[in-house]
Image (tube, helix red, strand yellow):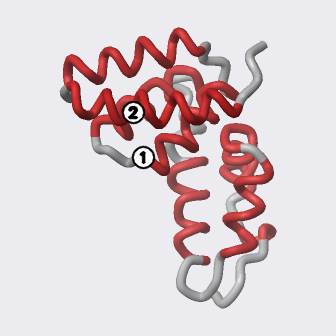
Amino acid sequence: MSSLDPADLDQAGLATRREVLGDEHVDRAIANADGTTADFQAFITQYAWDGVWNRPGLDRRQRSIVTLSVLAALHHDGELAMHVRAAVRNGLTREEIREVLLQVGIYAGVPAANRAFGVAQKVLAEIPES
């Protein structure tokens, strides 16, 4: 696959990906896909966004809580920033995000939470409070 045609993507996964991450992010990821990354974009759309995010066991708010926790614990700051935005889009409040990151501090360590709070602080400063 040399370029990615959105029509070639799992449509249920693509819809969820857009709802959670926003059209701008997804459009950019698809537009930047090339022969190296197009298959990966198709893979995550099908398996992460349809196969996991569309499962009935957890709602999107709960999935955002889990995702923030894991990304913070593993120091995946770029993905964490993207998912702080997604968590707000999925209805988490700033206070709930703070509570998630405090929980990370207890179970994954203070340095992990400290980094995560820094990432969240920058992202939340860009998002108008409602």
Q: Which residue is mark 2?
A: 116
**Residue drawn at (21%, 17%) of the image:** 106
Q: Which residue is mark 1?
A: 77
Q: Is residue 101 above or below residue 86?
A: above
**Residue drawn at (47%, 37%) of the image:** 119
Q: Amino acid at mark 1?
A: Asp
Q: Amino acid at mark 2?
A: Ala
Q: Nearer the viewer, residue 74 or 117?
A: 117
Name the image quarter holding the N terminus. bottom right
**Residue 88 percent across, percent down from the top left:** 65, 25
Q: Nearer the viewer, residue 125 or 77?
A: 125
Left or right of residue 114: residue 13: right
Instruction: Report helix, strand or loop for mark 2.
Output: helix
| 1 and 2 marks in contact (CB < 8 Å) | yes
* Total number of numbered discs in the rendering: 2
**Quarter of the view holding residue 30:** bottom right
**Residue drawn at (60%, 68%) of the image:** 42
Name the image quarter holding the C terminus. top right
**Residue 114 percent across, percent down from the top left:** 32, 29
